[in-house]
Amino acid sequence: MAQIDVTRQGTVFVLTMQAGENRFNRAFLDDLNRALDEVERSSGPAAMVTVGGTEKFYSNGLDLTWIAGEGQGEGGAFVGDVIRCLGRLLGFPVPTVAAINGHAFAAGAMLAPAHDFRVMRADRGFFCLPEIDIKIPFAPGMSALIKARLAGNVLRDAVLTGARYGGEAARERGIVDEAVGAAEVLPRAIERAAALADKDRHVYGAIKRGMYAEVLAVMERGSVGEFSS
């Protein structure tokens, strides 16, 4: 069964992550890439929204249990593939909006800022980069992404303290663009995406690749650095 459900509302593709905590393991990553393939193969006006399939989780990051067990043989190659997927999303040729309707932790908190815009639930759920507390250093591509998308002291505080930010706190710090009620997260994200769906995708993608050229160069290499130490 696919872990990413792809539907369409007008010009907006909605990718609903249906794997519970939506942790990144091989099956989840492969399904995400297949969903991105489907959007990219489309023609005409288009934009894309990602959302968690439950109210509790947007994405809870890497599936560390799978990595230590069934996925152990893949070593750092899998983490490199995750980084390349996030880079693919950062440079994606249609407008993207993350509808953060639950917790976004670790790699899930990197998935969200890989989108162009972010709408977060105001009343429940946290954005958190807990690597300092779970004693896992950021891979180079991960560092490049969050440095590009979080500003100054927000970046410092998020990565060095492992702070948890609710929707309003995340909005105040520029981590997300809007914090709204639970029932409004997905509709507002779709509204934002639809407003941009008629942008020329060739030009849109070229502009993004230019904006993030140095970041994408690091992410596309998929280097894990000290991550697997």
Image (cartoon, rainbow, N blue to C red):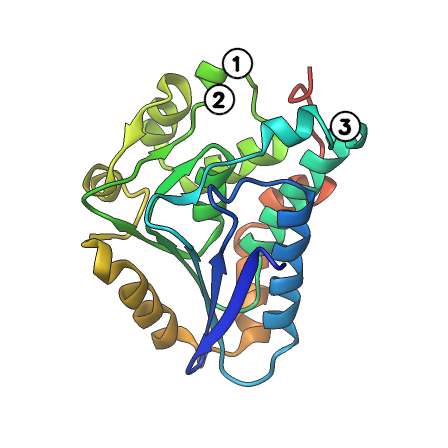
Question: Of callouts 3 and 2, which one flags the residue occurring earlier in the amino acid sequence?
Answer: 3
Dot 3: element: loop
Q: Which three-letter amino acid code belongs to the residue tagged 1?
A: Lys
Q: What is the number of the mark on residue 131?
A: 2
23 lies left or right of 56: right
- Give the CA separation, mark 1 to mark 3: 18 Å
- Work out whether mark 1 precedes mark 3 in sequence or the reverse, and give the earlier one: 3
Give me the residue at 35% from left, 18% from top.
Answer: 161
Q: Position of residue 221 (x, y in %)?
A: 73, 40
Choose top left, top right, bottom left or bottom right for residue 97. bottom left
Label 1 with label 3: CB-CB less than 8 Å: no
Label of residue 75 in the image: 3
Q: Residue 136, located in which quarter of the rendered image? A: top right
Examine the rendered structure and indicate whether residue 162 appears above or below residue 24: above
Residue under pointer 1: 135
Q: Residue furthest front?
A: 1
Q: How many marks?
A: 3
Q: CA distance from mark 1 to mark 2?
A: 6 Å
The amino acid type, in three-letter code, at marker 3 is Gly
